[in-house]
């Protein structure tokens, strides 16, 4: 009963946060000369107007599921991987480099498997480095993971100016990948690729690891109390590195699904907020892997709705970022308020027990 009550409270708080975020963002639209009522009508009618647009929701949802899983996994160990954006870019770089190197030499399905493995391993090793610095030197994982993203962004820029730049050397991007290494489309008439299936399966797999395996149990126990975990024979440092490796691998997988499933080339500055959105989605889902699927789907819907609004009105393209930013802000605020109320309730219960 207690768990059901917590889930009910989580849904209620999250719903209120989303509604407040939408109301506040809509209140800014008159300043841009846009009627907020008309804007809301456009958003919720255009999104479901045709199959292609609805497919775009799943396209946007795919990387959001994976980056939210990346944050959620370390969060269960009471660690904070703020660098999923960088690990996502590492996955993109590894998937692109592998695909370009072998797409004309080996069968397409084999190259895709190699790109998949390279992206997952690249992202995982990047996360492992952060976990090692935390476990060995007690480095602040929040700062280290965040700063790693900036380093990787500069690395991406360098590679797109040198070894990975397209043959004509005119633009900061790679050449297009051969169609043989594209993830197959699963819904005709849309851009939805096999990536969405991979993302959902990854969420189910991470849920299974966390709640049905001894590894997941050790990670969660370490997150609850490191000292108690150490006394029971669990090595917190090892769990830290393992959690960051798996987290980075998931973010790297997002890079593979984006490159081989959607972009089909690597370019500068794309999906620049995918990591920060993932944090908000994970918090919205209370770091539950299955909840991340539905929270990411909601964010994907808002992204597509915001794009439709920009196309149908005089609102600037940045209105999408404003909307998602306010929703994210209120979701984060609801998390901290809910957490504070829970702590206060626990203290009151403790005082009552001591009084008895």
Image (tube, rainbow, N blue to C red):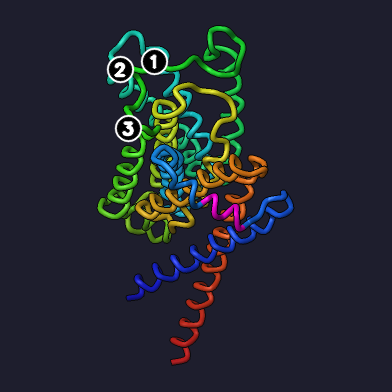
- Residue 258 location (% of width, % of height): 44, 31
Task: Give the residue pinned by disc 2.
Answer: 108
Q: Are marks 1 and 2 in contact (CB under 8 Å)?
A: yes
Say left or right for 82 vs 294: right
Residue depicted at 32% across the width and 18% down the height = 111
- Residue 34 location (% of width, % of height): 68, 51
The part of the image, by quadrant, that contains residue 222 is bottom left
Task: Give the residue pinned by disc 3.
Answer: 188
Say left or right for 47 vs 205: right
Say left or right for 5 vs 335: left
The part of the image, by quadrant, that contains residue 122 is top left
Which residue is the extreme one toward the bottom?
A: 356
Residue depicted at 46% across the width and 37% down the height = 127
Q: Which residues are magenta?
A: 37-43
Q: Is residue 136 visible?
A: yes
Task: Pick whichever of labels 1 and 2 is earlier in the sequence.
Answer: 2
- Provide the secondary structure element on which disc 2 rests: helix
Which of the two residues, 338 or 308, is positioned nearer the viewer here? 308
Q: Is residue 245 visible?
A: no
Circle 2 packing at 10 Å, graded few (<14), some (14-19), many (20+), is: some
Which of the two residues, 78 or 270, is positioned nearer the viewer here? 270
The image quadrant where one finds the N terminus is bottom left
Relative to 108, say whether 142 is above or below.
Answer: below
Task: Give the residue pinned by disc 1.
Answer: 178
Residue depicted at 29% across the width and 45% down the height = 205
Q: CA distance from mark 1 to mark 2?
A: 9 Å
Task: Pick whichever of labels 2 and 3 is earlier in the sequence.
Answer: 2
Q: CA distance from mark 3 to mark 1?
A: 20 Å
């Amino acid at each position: 009963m207690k768990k059901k009550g917590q889930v009910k409270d989580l849904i209620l708080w999250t719903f209120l946060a989303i509604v407040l975020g939408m109301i506040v963002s809509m209140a800014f639209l008159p300043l841009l000369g846009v009627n907020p009522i008309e804007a809301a009508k456009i958003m919720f009618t255009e999104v479901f107007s045709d199959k292609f647009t609805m497919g775009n929701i799943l396209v946007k949802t795919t990387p959001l599921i994976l980056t939210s899983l990346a944050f959620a996994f370390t969060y269960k160990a009471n660690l904070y991987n703020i660098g999923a954006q960088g690990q996502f870019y590492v996955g993109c770089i590894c998937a692109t480099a592998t695909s370009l190197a072998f797409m004309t030499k080996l069968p397409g399905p084999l190259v895709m498997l190699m790109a998949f493995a390279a992206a997952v391993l690249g992202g995982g090793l990047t996360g492992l480095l952060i976990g090692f610095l935390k476990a060995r030197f007690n480095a602040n994982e929040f700062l280290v993971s965040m700063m790693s993203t900036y380093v990787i962004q500069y690395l991406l820029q360098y590679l797109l100016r040198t070894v990975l730049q397209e043959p004509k050397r005119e633009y900061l991007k790679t050449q297009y990948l051969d169609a043989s290494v594209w993830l197959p489309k699963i819904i005709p008439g849309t851009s939805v690729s096999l990536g969405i299936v991979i993302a959902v399966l990854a969420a189910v797999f991470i849920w299974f690891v966390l709640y049905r395996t001894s590894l997941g149990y050790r990670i969660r126990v370490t997150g609850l109390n490191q000292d108690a975990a150490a006394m029971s024979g669990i090595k917190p440092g090892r769990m830290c590195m393992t959690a960051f490796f798996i987290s980075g691998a998931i973010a790297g997988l997002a890079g593979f699904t984006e490159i081989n499933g959607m972009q089909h080339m690597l370019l500068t500055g794309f999906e620049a907020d995918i990591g920060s959105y993932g944090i908000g989605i994970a918090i919205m889902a209370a770091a539950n892997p299955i909840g991340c699927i539905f929270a990411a789907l909601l964010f994907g819907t808002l992204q597509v709705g915001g794009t439709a609004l920009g196309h149908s009105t005089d609102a600037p393209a940045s209105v999408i970022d404003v909307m998602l930013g306010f929703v994210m802000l209120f979701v984060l605020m609801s998390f901290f308020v809910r957490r504070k109320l829970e702590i206060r309730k626990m203290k009151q219960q403790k005082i009552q027990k001591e009084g008895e």
